[in-house]
Amino acid sequence: MPLKKKSKWKEGRAAYAMILPAVLIIAAVALWPLLRSFWISLFDLRLGDPTRNAIHYSYSMNVEQYADRFPGLLRAVKREAGNAGGGALSVLSAVEKKLDEVGGGLEDDRAFQERLTKVNGLLDAFSPVPQELRFIPVDNAKAERLKAELQEIRKELAGLKAAGSLERPDEVIGLTNAVLDTFQAPNFVGLSHYKDLMSGRRLWESLGNTMLFTVFAVALEMLLGLLIALLMNRTFRGRGLVRAAVLIPWATPTAVSAMIWHYLYDGQNGIVAKLLYEAGLISDMGTLLSSGSRVMGSVIMADVWKTAPFVALLLLAGLQNIPASLYEAAWVDGGGRWKQFLHVTVPLLKPAFFVALMFRTLDAFRVFDLIYVLTGGGPANSTESISIYAYKTMFSELDFGKGSALSVIVFVCVLLISMVYVKWLGADVVGRRAS
Amino acid sequence: MRTKAGKLSMALILTGVLLAGCGNSGNNAGSGSASGESSAAPSAGASAAATAAPAAGEKVKIVFSQGADQTDGTKKLVEAFEAQHPDIDVEVREFPNDSSQMHDQLLTILSGQSSEIDVVNLDVTWPAEFAQAGFLLPLDRYIEQDGIDTNEYLKGGIEAGYYNGQQWAFPRYNNAGLLYYRTDLVKKVPTTWDELLKQAEELKGKGGTKYGFVTQGKQYEGLAVGFTELVNAYGGQIIDDQGNVVVNSPEALKGLKKLIEIQTSKAVPSNLNTFTEKETLTAFIEGDAVFARHWPALYAQANDAKVSKVVGKVGIAPLPAGDARSAAALGGWLGAISKYSKHPKEAWEFLKFLISEQGEKIVAINNTQTPTYLKLFDDPEVQKASPLFASRDFVNGLGSAVPRTITPQYAKISGLIQVEVSKAIAGQQTAEQALANLETQIKAAVSQ
């Protein structure tokens, strides 16, 4: 008995070892980016902001920027003091003293002092400062104290500017800001990106738009795709040609087809706009891309044109797997065309249909390129999908923390959708094969 | 239990593979982390390469990036420069003309600390953002060394390149929004927005036109420009000189209300909210519109008999005024040097040439781009290139053009303006609500 158990255990181990590469690959390509996104979404990370363009767990300073800016600020303040008189002069000398204290506080530190000398040497020689020399950790309490002092200095300078007693106010105030920017604060924010997003309207509106798009586009695509597949499955003259022709929309890159539709819908010269207008379906050629509710319809139509052939192809493969003998048997049993469809085609096509449905739903939920080219999310944000929102946040605003939070939200939505599918519909697809 | 877990993991795997395989969003996050890491990784390669300074007499190649140029102006510019500097080779790298695409591509390149670009053309709203991100080399030291007098250049352009006490970019050519009109239809050029609207409604349909007025109404940067112009024309501001958010003021409200009135009037196309510069241009040169708001570049095309149906009937005027003044948004491009350039000295030589009298003249004549070097407006050859350059109105209008808000958060603020104003025009919210929303959102954006 123990011997058998042992061999079973061995066998099991071997089995696990065999699937290990697959598990590792999945972990590397799917789980790692996901976990990384989630981790980033917990930070206030912005690529366009040098104090926040990396994850910081504690305070640090950019020594290169400090070396570039601090002496300049001192010089500028000294020059202003040289030109000022009366009250302004005393304020400026106080500012100067404070600045000396700030600089002294930092340069007291031996490590900082050494680093600064090294960096200054490099800068004087016109050679770039390597990344590992650029940043030096600073004690949190000290950094906060120095920052507070600099903010105090900025306030005093702003006061002088308002009184008109500075010669070049933008220079000293700007440089004070620049020196403040050399401090890199820890930027962990926890779940606050999620909180902000959930309490704002824009997330819910874009989710609503995405849902609307997904439901209507997928429903129409499945219906049309089924019809096309049934048609293509019959033998008729020129079938090869039709099958090839039907695939053209699917083969066209989405960005290109979106441009084509943009021309077709154009309110001044668009053919589709003109035809719909002549047919009396729209009151004005311009409304296809300009009136809130119709624009989503136009986007859905362009997507259906493009993706119905893909669905048709998937369903066609399913149809061709149904043995002809079953239709013959049904025919012998006296079943008409309709009965054959209901009792042979429908049940046997179900797995292929659900696979296509699941693929399309998940795909449609992430719609980006079509909308980006066709409307850019407008007008009045009425076609902004969640992916467009994430793109704008990440790449136009370079807010990677919030953008990552958005993509995690997209992931959760997609996960929920697939769970629903696997549970309610996918029993045929996943369950039966697995058992 | 087992099957449930199996189903769950199946769902997880499926979504994971889908996201990783072809996902936009999932992948974005992945690449985001990748670039985040690379910016923190030691850039040993850059420093090693930089220490290998070119030996004397060796040719140095620098790369200049700008939007694609349909004329041969850039070629001539580079030839003239290389004739003066035989030891420097300039390679021009072209980017998409869509400025937001160029923006995103440049950010990708520069945030990867790539040294592939030396001199870069920046749109008027980017320098603060790029400077704050640490992508640019401050120019003050060089400007001082070479004794360049910034007072000889257009003030608005210099200001656009100035941020936090330092000059990061130098204006190469500037432009400002203009009012175009049909000289065969318009008898008295409107000087206020109210007058423009009245005339546009009256003249619509005359002389084969379909619309009284066309402008940029799509939810994109152009709408933020239009908003800035109207708000300033009525005496409002978005962010004041002290950096306070003052967008929710009675003046700004008047401006926004006028913008909504114009964009929803009978005089404009019903689908004005799909109009970018391209649609505006088409409508005007097809002879469909009486008035148009556009940039100086339209003038040359409107008088080109190959594409235009309105040759010889094109008039220009400063944009109409509101209660306070006529305010045109400042446009244009600035030259800057990448922080990661391996040849900053040569890059500066080229930039210096770009903004020199000779360099700007080549661009003014070949590309009909408006020079920023003010003395060029008195140059007969430049005056001949475009009647705009000879027009005092135009040059004065340029001088009073308002820069869009100079802030590193510009992209974000512009995005917020586009959304809120577009909603107000669509009637989904009132102008008051739009400004109140903008105030809270912009405050949150700049305080972060």
Image (cartoon, coloured by chain):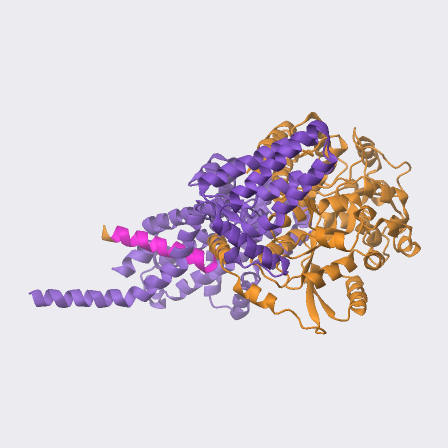
B304 to A104, vertically: above or below: below
* Residue B12 falls inside the magenta stretch: yes
Residue furthest toward the right? B380
Span highlighted in magenta in the image: B3-23
- Residue A199: where, in percent of width, then height? 47, 34
List x then y, in percent, for residue A345. Answer: 38, 59
Q: What is the x, y in percent for residue A428?
A: 31, 56
- Which picture quadrant has residue A171? top right
Chain rendered purple: A
Q: Is residue A51 left or right of residue B195?
A: left
Say how many tags the image has: 0
| Residue B129 covered by magenta stretch | no
Q: Nearer the viewer, residue A209 or B298?
A: B298
In this rendered view, identify the residue nearer to me: A403 or A204.
Answer: A403
Residue A360, horizontal then vertical, whole percent:
45, 54
Query: Measuring 42% from the left and 49% from the top, which residue is drawn there?
Result: A39
In front of the other: B137 or B317: B137
* Viewer-nearest residue: B283 or A132: A132
Q: In which quadrant of the rendered image does the C terminus of chain B lie?
A: top right
Q: Give me the chain that's orange.
A: B
Q: Quadrant of residue B363?
A: bottom right
Say left or right for B437 vs B336.
Answer: left
Q: Residue at x 70, y 74 (%)?
A: B58
Q: Main secondary structure of the magenta part?
A: helix
What residue occupies the far top of the structure in this picture? B250
B392 on left or right of A225: right
Vertical order, B362 against A273 (above or below): below
Name the image quarter holding residue B317: top right
